[in-house]
Image (tube, helix red, strand yellow):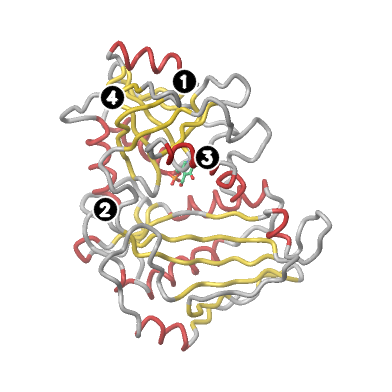
Amino acid sequence: VSLIVTEEAKAAIKNFELPSELGFGQVLSPIMAVCDFKNGEWQNLEILPYGPISIDPICQVLHYAQEIFEGMKAYKVDNKGPFLFRPEQNWIRFNKSAERMAMAKVPQEIFMDAVMEVTRMSKDLIPSNSGESLYLRPFMFATDSGLGVKTSKSYKFMVVASPSGSYFSKDSVSVLIERELIRACPGGIGAAKTGGNYAGSLASAQKVNKLGYMQTMWLDAINHENIEELSGMNFFSVINGKLVTPKITDTILDGITRRSIIQLAKSLEIEVVEESLSITKLIDKIKSGECSECFASGTAAIITPIGFLAEENGTKYELPTIDNSIATKLRQTLLSIQEGRIDGPEGWVVTVK
Ligand SMILES: Cc1ncc(COP(=O)(O)O)c(C=O)c1O
């Protein structure tokens, strides 16, 4: 497989002017990486100008949602870097998602070359204040035509990139406890980063927006009792000084930020408990003051404190605002590693040359 950077893509980068207002995931780098899988083989990886692609109306992905994606960031704060954070973990998870969705696997070289080249060519577009980054979106979808439900034999793998500010415009996130709808069930696709999980979350997101909150908290499918995660983030709480987070099952996305936080917390001598965590118990601990913090973790959110949990009837369980919180300490440590101010564990930060 060869990497082909087209003249049109080089020109697109040269002529691009970055708007002053970025938001999150709204402004796109003017290039994209594209690699097709057909006849059992990966074709050349091409860097093209960003733009519409043409697909058949009966393309499998449009009807049966055979699709996966990843989310990762390149940091260039204070003009250091760009740095990627644990990119091989995204590649590994991408192929786990591919396996669950019965799709072709993407070789490490193609995934990395695509992510690296898009980042390298976009490097002058990466905003450089702390918390800002180039948000990278690798994705792949089924391209066979036909209305019969079947596994596609051809796929398109792509990477697009978005110079972005913070994901949340506020310092904390408000969360609705979803007591009715569910996100994932045992044996299902909850652990895969596939579009259907997010499509299925939107009805709840509509409720959340209407009530003026920001994220859905999902509970387990069987008893509607154990906390799983938020729609695009993992969940952590601090109970009696210990960091408590739901253990990963096949209904939860295994967050790379989550795993990194657990490792950092242990190195900071914070005790970590990974176990199922019931919403009833959490609410009791918030009321008694034993639960001092809740926060969300993810590539987009980094670590964002949860201000309150709410029920649909308007009942709110507020978390106290505290100085020197564990969330703040972990966020500062993690972001300092990601942005290249301090050294993290071996292999976490990869420089794009
Ligand atoms: C459903 C869901 N859970 C958790 C996460 C956090 O995963 P990571 O830390 O790898 O970004 C994400 C997003 O990335 C997500 O979409």
Q: Name the residue under label 2.
A: 131
Q: Distance between the residues labelled 4 and 3?
A: 25 Å
Q: Name the residue under label 3.
A: 253
Mark 3 Cβ and ligand 1 under 8 Å apart: yes
Badge 4 marks a residue whose secondary structure is loop
Badge 2 marks a residue whose secondary structure is loop
Q: Mark 4 points at which residue?
A: 319
N-term-proximal mark, 1 vs 3: 3
Residue farthest to the right, as pictured: 148
Residue at horizontal 76 percent and vertical 71 percent from the top: 39
Circle 1/circle 3 CB separation < 8 Å: no
Q: Where is residue 280 in the image (x, y as percent from the top left)?
A: 45, 15
N-term-proximal mark, 3 vs 2: 2
Q: How far apart are marks 1 and 3 (CA)?
A: 16 Å
Mark 1 Cβ and ligand 1 under 8 Å apart: no
Badge 3 marks a residue whose secondary structure is loop
